[in-house]
Amino acid sequence: MSRTRSRAVVLDQACVAAVDLARRAVEENVKPEQVGEHLGVEGEGDRVVTHYFACLDPAYRGWRWAVTVARASRARNVTVSEVVLLPGTGALMPPQWVPWSERLRPGDLGVGDLLPTSDDDDRLAPGFTETDDETDHQMIFEYGLGRARVLSPIGRDRAVRRWHSGESGPHTPLAHAAPAQCSTCGFYWPLAGALRTGFGVCANEYAPDDGRVVAADHGCGAHSEAAVLPHQVEPASPILDDLSYDTAENPESGPELAGSVDETASEPLGHS
């Protein structure tokens, strides 16, 4: 059984000693005050060594300058191969790049934006896999009238979990305060197909979820069978009798007799 042995890199002493050459190579590209102390060397190959210097630029804390120097075979002079800035331990690094299609969130798409779906999108399945008890979708697809791809079981399950756990599901304060569930509401329009038993569309223009998919066990205060508030009767204005008066005690003249304001003193009838 053969074993592969890695040969240790022997540091070329002329390249190791070229610290000043490496520093000058960095200072030619940046300000000298941005180049810090020498951090060490690392062998890259035969007569190839990389020198590391601390980077003092406040924007690149934790980074280091790497200067690779080399010496040709049987040559005395050491030359600079490349100068780069590399992250060190504790360096501030950007987050891992994520494709735009994976960074997209609901509501990000605007007018004119396009979001192509890949050929291997597991949320979709070939159109001929769609079946229905009333229509032969296979025949429709063969005639070129069907959809090229339809929702796959994976895509359907993701939608079910997303809708049921979202704002249109049963676990919201609006649903908890509702008088009844959407499944018993007259404005609830069930979806067709496999999702019919669990989801529908709200058709109540006064409901907060009008025109949206809602779970059957969702609910709101605009339920069609909500209790009718009792008729509020406007209280009648009080009737004040201002044509009569009561007896009142007068501490100076004594009690007065009650009478009516429309009473007049009767005159004796005269005889003609």
Image (cartoon, helix red, strand yellow):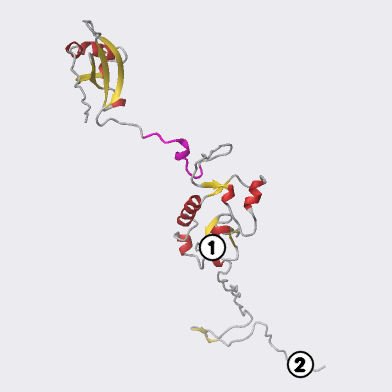
Say which of 85 and 123 sits in front: 123
Residue interval drawn in magenta: 96-107
Which is closer to the viewer, label 2 or label 1?
1
Q: Residues within 10 Å of mark 1 (few under 14, many from 20)?
A: few
Q: Position of residue 142 (x, y in %)?
A: 65, 46
Q: Position of residue 26 (x, y in %)?
A: 28, 15
Q: What residue lies at 54% left-to-right and 65% top-to-bottom?
A: 183
Q: Is residue 73 magenta?
A: no
Q: What residue lies at 28% left-to-right and 30% top-to-bottom?
A: 91
Q: What residue lies at 27% left-to-right and 20% top-to-bottom?
A: 65
Disc 1 marks a residue whose amino acid type is Thr
Q: Is residue 24 visible?
A: yes
Badge 2 marks a residue whose secondary structure is loop
Query: Which numbered circle lies on residue 269?
Result: 2
**3D distance between C-alphas at marks 2 and 1:** 96 Å
Quarter containing the N terminus: top left
Query: How many labels, in total?
Result: 2
Q: Is residue 88 left or right of residue 125?
A: left
Say which of 252 and 102 sits in front: 102
